[in-house]
Amino acid sequence: MKAGIVGLPNVGKSTLFNCLSNAKAQSANFPFCTIEPNIGVVNVPDPRINRLEELVKPQAVQMATVDIVDIAGLVKGASKGEGLGNQFLANIRECNAIIHVLRCFDNDNIVHVDGNVNPIRDKETIDIELQLKDLETVEKRLEKVNRAAKTGNKEAQVEKALLDRIRETLLQAKSARTVEPQNQDEIELLEDFQLITNKPVLYVCNVDENSAVNGNKYVDQVRELVKDEDAEVIILSVGAEADITELESYEERQVFLEDMGLTEPGSAVLIRAAYKLLKLQTYFTAGVKEVRAWTINVGDTAPKAAGVIHTDFEKGFIRAEVIAFDDYSSLGSEAKAKEAGKLRVEGKEYIVKDGDVMHFRFNV
């Protein structure tokens, strides 16, 4: 599961990517600096794993991770191949969610591809290019489906009705994610279409250091614009975040954050938001050899969760022993949780909850 960072050239995408991944994607003051999509495997900050480490004192700790992709900047005409349009659109299609970076700061030393700072126009530029590409996809699919629908094929008629609604939505300059599927068939069809504007989106307002806590007029404009989109807006001073990552010690980083009025780096907030955007959650295994966070999809059953460790665990699943994180944390150990009756035995139908501490019994 990957989240792709998108935006116009020079809005801070590659600098943000560097902050998140500690990979050093090229970062320069001109468009199309990032040619190949850089992929960073990023640890997901989670205070719960620190607490488990404190209690269990394991030999090793393994955090959950999420893949972040830095994609080349998009410009007007990308849907027709302008700039690096075709490559951009292919890269974004492979991602499962979008982190859309908007420039919300003034700085005469950093050129803006359209001449001046206007996050509303910038957002619309990218939205329109993605909508145009989706419109092309929908119309091609309609050409095929129309013929089958005319012959009375029921499945084709269902698909045509949904495609017509999506086409109408895109022609109104709205994204496919605003189309409400009316039943399970439509949910599955929407997935199958793989439309770019159906991917969940998170907006990152890149602000100056002084606006990192409360935002500014540009952030207010973005919030007003996306209020009906069911999308989260995060404020981040990407320049300040870059400075923080250069500091050697934890203490120095904390002093820097306190001076800015922050309790943690904005990048940590963003990584957790991206993880949630991808509909991912965490369960833990905790033993003296290793405390580990495992990444699963929201709604996964216990056997599916076991399969993330090893396919044999899923195939031969017998049962799961489960302690809720809060119980483990407050009682202090697995043994004490067991004594207090807080260890549960769950079967194949159990839907894993975020933060469960689990052991699996299996037989192959």
Image (tube, rainbow, N blue to C red):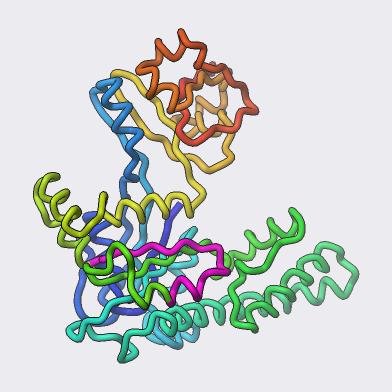
Asked whether the viewer can see residue 37, the reply is: no
Which image quadrant is residue 239 in? Answer: bottom left
Q: Is residue 272 left or right of residue 248?
A: right
Percent of width and height locating residue 158: 80, 65
Residue 236 highlighted magenta (yes or no): yes
* Residue depicted at x 56% and y 78%: 131
* Residue depicted at x 41% and y 22%: 328
Percent of width and height locating residue 47: 32, 37
Q: Does 316 appear above or below 119?
A: above
**Region in magenta:** 221-238
Q: Is residue 84 left or right of residue 246?
A: right
Q: Does 7 appear above or below 322?
A: below
Q: Does 175 appear above or below 245?
A: below
* Residue depicted at x 41% and y 69%: 100
**Residue lying furthest bottom in this view?**
115
Q: Does 92 appear above or below 319?
A: below
Q: Is residue 83 left or right of residue 172?
A: left
Residue 46 highlighted magenta (yes or no): no
Percent of width and height locating residue 72: 34, 73
In this rendered view, identify the residue nearer to me: 25 or 116: 116
Percent of width and height locating residue 209: 22, 68
* Residue depicted at x 79% and y 71%: 161
Which image quadrant is residue 363 in? Answer: top right
